[in-house]
Amino acid sequence: MSSDRTRSAILAAAERLYADRGFGDVTLRDIVAEANVNLAAVNYHFGSKDELIAELFVTRSLATNRERLNALKLAEEQGGGRAPIDAILHALVGPTLRGCLGPDREGSTAARFMIRASIESVPPIRRIKNREVDHLRKFIAAMRRSLPGRDDAELYWGLHFALAMSHHTIREKERLMKLSEGQCDLNDVDAIVDRVVSVSVMALTAGQTPARKASVRPAPPHGRLTRQDL
Amino acid sequence: MSSDRTRSAILAAAERLYADRGFGDVTLRDIVAEANVNLAAVNYHFGSKDELIAELFVTRSLATNRERLNALKLAEEQGGGRAPIDAILHALVGPTLRGCLGPDREGSTAARFMIRASIESVPPIRRIKNREVDHLRKFIAAMRRSLPGRDDAELYWGLHFALAMSHHTIREKERLMKLSEGQCDLNDVDAIVDRVVSVSVMALTAGQTPARKASVRPAPPHGRLTRQDL
DNA sequence: TTGCAATTCAAACAGTTGTATGAAACTATC
DNA sequence: GATAGTTTCATACAACTGTTTGAATTGCAA
């Protein structure tokens, strides 16, 4: 069908333009010009501008969520149903950070689009993000299995802070580079992931006795950086 | 002058409407209707819509920055020119968190406006935020004095994460409450500040030997919560 | 009171936006 | 090759936006 060509041309052009210039000042006319299609094609294929944006965002975030859950599942299988806390946090923040940062991703339209979506927060995207709670609950459940002694509130705060650090790093990437005058290496994504995870683990395990801590979080797997390695 | 009455009526109405409904769907006509003034008054008194928004935001964030610097100065004076790291972080995140969260602030227009400004990120506000770097450098300098052994990059990351946690808590307050089903107490602002500070301190002092750690951060002042207290 | 400046006002302007329309072009099936 | 269904197209629409204009009004000083 020729219809698919138009549809995907619109999607590609829209993602590119939104990534470059933000949602605020990209109009449907900009998009159809970039895609070399007719203005009416957007409403024909997507119904409305908001539904176009929603489709773009859903596609990308479904991919991230899938990646997250796969990593979580793998970690739990390896741990016999009880994944180490740092592996859980890795599964949570790794895909997002790897998707949005890193030198090779500099030219990636998808990555820059997701950064925009994280910064600007336009209505159709906000609506989708609000449904993300169920997804996060799966990580809370895994954390509960991993740290059975902790209060639930502590787990929520730990997950909250992990997301805070990763999202804020994506969102304020430029400012951190400017502030630190290049001393913070924003290209070494693995190091950033490890850093976020290790701080989150500290937040989650603070106040536990070392003995208990050791029993709950037996050993750092996959050679990930932990507090002792810093 | 009657001109001041109009000016401040516009400011008050704008802040209220932006706080309630966001920048996205509040027009100048909404504002002048709420303020009971003529449409042209906005451009007469402020020049443009963006300058109105900028004035609102500058006023509020200048107040926060003043509060921050006062707290920092006080902490450094008390420490003889070298403030304890947790006092520095308190000075950094305390004013923002106290300004935007808390039960008594629920009805505060200013607080809700600043939350909006944190969530939506509209051009005039973004421009102002980008000039905030100089302000943050003062905190980096204080942190360098407080933790003379640490790499600068570590200090930048620590400050970055502290801001990440406080801003994300403000921004995602509702979602955290929904996710945790009320188990995270978003009304106890002091506890939140302490929590953010203590995690930031852990991030900044991780990897240091306990001996060194103790010498650098001698004692928890003002009865603030530290890691051991959690 | 007179005069002058500052302020307010109703009205219009100029531009942009997302969406709808109905005819035209295309595609595939019979 | 006629037909039915899908897709494209140029164009118009209707609404809304921030801003400007020029006259009316107000407040204050001389």
Image (cartoon, coloured by chain):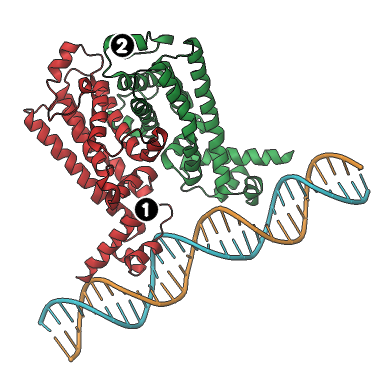
Chain colours: A red, B green, C cyan, D orange
Residue B94 visible in this rendered orientation of the protein = yes
Q: Residue tagged by mark 1?
A: A20
A206 and D15: which is toward the camera: A206
**At 62% from the left edge and 45% from the top edge, which residue is drawn?**
B46
Q: Residue at x 40, y 64 (%)?
A: A29
**Residue drawn at point x = 51 percent, y = 39 percent:** B128
Q: Which of the image's four quarters has the N terminus of chain A?
A: bottom left
A120 is higher (above) or lower (below) than A194: below
Tell me where residue B98 appears, x and y as whole percent. Answer: 46, 24
Give the vertical position of B142 relative to A37 (above or below).
above
Q: Which residue is mark 2?
A: B212
Identity, as a three-letter code, of the amino acid under mark 1? Asp
Left or right: where does residue B36 sit relative to residue D10?
A: right
Q: How many marks?
A: 2
Between marks 2 and 1 in the image, the one whose residue lies nearer the viewer: 2
Q: Secondary structure at mark 1?
A: helix
Answer few, some or many: residues within 10 Å of disc 1's Cα (few below 14, many 20 plus, some between 14 and 19). Answer: some
x and y, in percent, of residue B186 in the image: 37, 25
Residue A178: quarter of image: top left
For the residues labelled 2 and 1, the Cα–Cα distance comes to: 47 Å
- Disc 1: which chain? A
Q: Quadrant of the C terminus of chain A?
A: top left
Name the chain letter of the residue that bears numbered label 2: B
| Badge 2 amino acid | Arg
